[in-house]
Image (cartoon, helix red, strand yellow):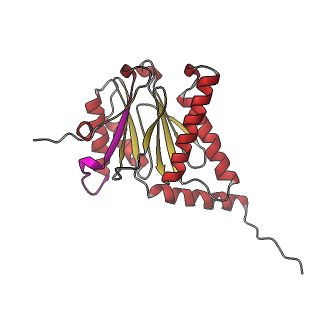
Amino acid sequence: MVTVPYYVPPEQMMKDRAEFARKGIARGRSIVAVEYVDGIVIVAENPSGSLQKIGELYDRIAFAGVGKYNEFEALRVAGIRHADLKGYAYAREDVTAKGLANAYAQTLGHIFTQEIKPYEVEVMVAEAGRSADDNRIFRVTYDGTLYADQGVSAIGGRDEQLRSRLEASFGPGAPLATALGWARAAFEEEGADPIPPEAWEAAVIDRTLGRRGFRRLTVGEIAPRTS
């Protein structure tokens, strides 16, 4: 007796993988990025005090990820290695957010189409340029789709709503405190419960800090207490 192999149409397989990945990502907490006068601030709602969702990749380039922590952390580490090798082999100026985002898009696209299980992640790569016009923010979805944003960006569960709220309030050239206020307000307007100060995570890539412009913000800077 000949056994008929189990067959799933390719379009159904891709649809099932996409639905699986989206469900995993939707359970994660969102991350937003907002440009300000000296660079870009990235803000996340992150109740975990030990697992960081935002990190440094290279000179004035930052990474953020939502979804399964072990998967986006592996991507972050791979991005650091990719950047270090390229900077060493060529020049530090050759390492750019666009190049790293393209590498992430290729990796996630390959995993989505070739592996049994897609990654349940979305990632963001942001670069503070020499001037505000040179700032770059990219986001890469679970299937390798690459987007370039200007001014504001968001990834994760409520990304579309957060982007809409940030776009409504954003204005170029704002100070850091104002950009942080826009980010906090967008999160709080979308959430049912108030977010305690210790549940925030944020970092900046600031062009005034020199070659390595990445800096984590303190709880007091992110959500200053009012007397």
Chain part drawn in magenta: 191-206
Q: Nearer the viewer, residue 96 or 152?
A: 96
- In the image, is residue 200 part of the stretch drawn in magenta? yes
Vertical position of residue 19 compared to residue 204: above or below: below
Q: Is residue 11 left or right of residue 31?
A: right
Residue drawn 34% across and 50% down?
A: 49
Residue drawn 43% across and 53% down?
A: 157
Residue drawn 31% across and 44% down?
A: 186
Q: Position of residue 224 (x, y in %)?
A: 20, 39
- In the image, is residue 110 part of the stretch drawn in magenta? no
Vertical position of residue 96 compared to residue 142: above or below: above
Residue drawn 35% across and 39% down?
A: 202
The quadrant of the picture occupied by the N terminus is: bottom right
Q: Nearer the viewer, residue 80 or 155?
A: 80
Q: Nearer the viewer, residue 70 or 179?
A: 70
Vertical position of residue 53 compared to residue 174: above or below: below
